[in-house]
Image: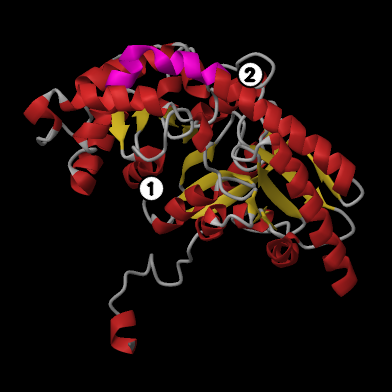
Amino acid sequence: MEDLNALFASRVVGAQSSIVRELLAFSKMPHIISLAGGIPAADMFDLEGIEAATLEAMKMGVSAYQYSVTDGEPELRERVTHLIAERGIESDKDQVVITSGSQQGLDLVARTFIDAGDVVLVEQPTYLAAIQVFRMAGAEIASIKGSTDGLDLDDLEAQVKALKAQNKRIKALYIVPTFANPTGSTMSEANRVRLLSLAVEYNFVILEDDPYGEIRFEGDRVPSIYGLAKRTATGEDHAVYLSSFSKILVPGLRLGFIVANKAIREKIVLVKQSVDLHTPVLPQLIVEKYLASGHLKDRIPAISYTYGQRCASLMKALDEYVGEDLEYQKPVGGMFLWARLKNGMSATKLLNYGKDAGVVFVPGAAFYAEGADDSTLRLSFATVNPEGTVEAAKRLAVAIQKYKESN
């Protein structure tokens, strides 16, 4: 075994599995209510519409099963430009790359921009799988304070100056600016403009991840950072937009996309050639046919309404059953509620009592690259109906009581 360990690449030695992936198994257990997985609600899948799109795609014959171009089917890339135009992003299909889920998008941009030892800036806390990607790329991760308005830009600028003084190579900042995972926070337009100016001034690229932006319960859409960048002379050189069909259509087709200026896109396509040649054709055609049907535009309001109802129900239940022991940030969209235990309780320890009580969540420590706050936890309400959220809060109250009695 010692000889085998010597053969492994340093990037995988000591790498650990995501706790979120491990907790996903609990979502399939009938006696457990899972507030853990960041998965969309299966009862909101438009199975009839997807089946019709699949049949249309299969009628295309050989072209649905043959090799294809690396950057994605041209018709789907064109559909993506119409989709993001509704998000305020003007582009053409030659700025789009279709990926095998947004997770591959993260991997591709990491491979495109990051050398071992380069610095990647992330919000604290941030999306766990992004931390994994950047560590696999050999990046040094620098955590920037977060707030209810997203990234603390004063802390960002101070840290960038300090890192530059140490001759560190700052390549990128990763951010989920709208309904962030895990906190649910949204960055204001004014702060997005300032962030973009900092990226230009200090020469790093903003990796804007937007898988949840369509799922808004209340308020008005905030312009994307990439959309704002395209309105400036040099901003588009400092921003890349990533998104996914997983949260608004279905995750099993594993389709996402990247939008970037043509110079950046060209490099991303070269990297993707070496990774998988191209994203599978049949799922691309299915999504293209589905978008052509117009059903997605009709589905998003229903998804947003349902998730909003589930979020409101969970917040009300938490207030009633565990309000003395837990506080949370109210989200206005997305899939997550970020909470904090009071009185020095540990979310990691509480999880064990939660399993016994029949409810699971993700301890917040998993979302920190450094300096983890173990009193925090992420609760996902997307898959739990209002009745289930009440029962989940009751079970969480039982778990907290058992925790107190044992500590």
Q: For residue 114, which numbered disc appears in the image? A: 1
Classify 124 as above or below 261: below
Q: Position of residue 74 (x, y in %)?
A: 21, 20
Quick one: quadrant of the N terminus? bottom left
Most prominent secondary structure in the magenta stretch? helix
Front one among 172 and 327: 327
Quick one: quadrant of the C terminus? bottom right
Front one among 92 and 248: 248
Amino acid type of disc 2?
Glu
Q: In the displayed structure, does residue 112 sit left or right of residue 360?
A: left
Residue at 23% in and 18% down: 75
> Badge 1: few (under 14), some or many (20 or more) residues near its Cα, within 10 Å?
many
Identify the magenta region. Answer: 288-301
Q: Position of residue 71 (x, y in %)?
A: 22, 30
Q: Which residue corresponds to mark 2?
A: 189
Classify 362 as above or below 112: below
**Sequence-earlier tag: 1 or 2:** 1
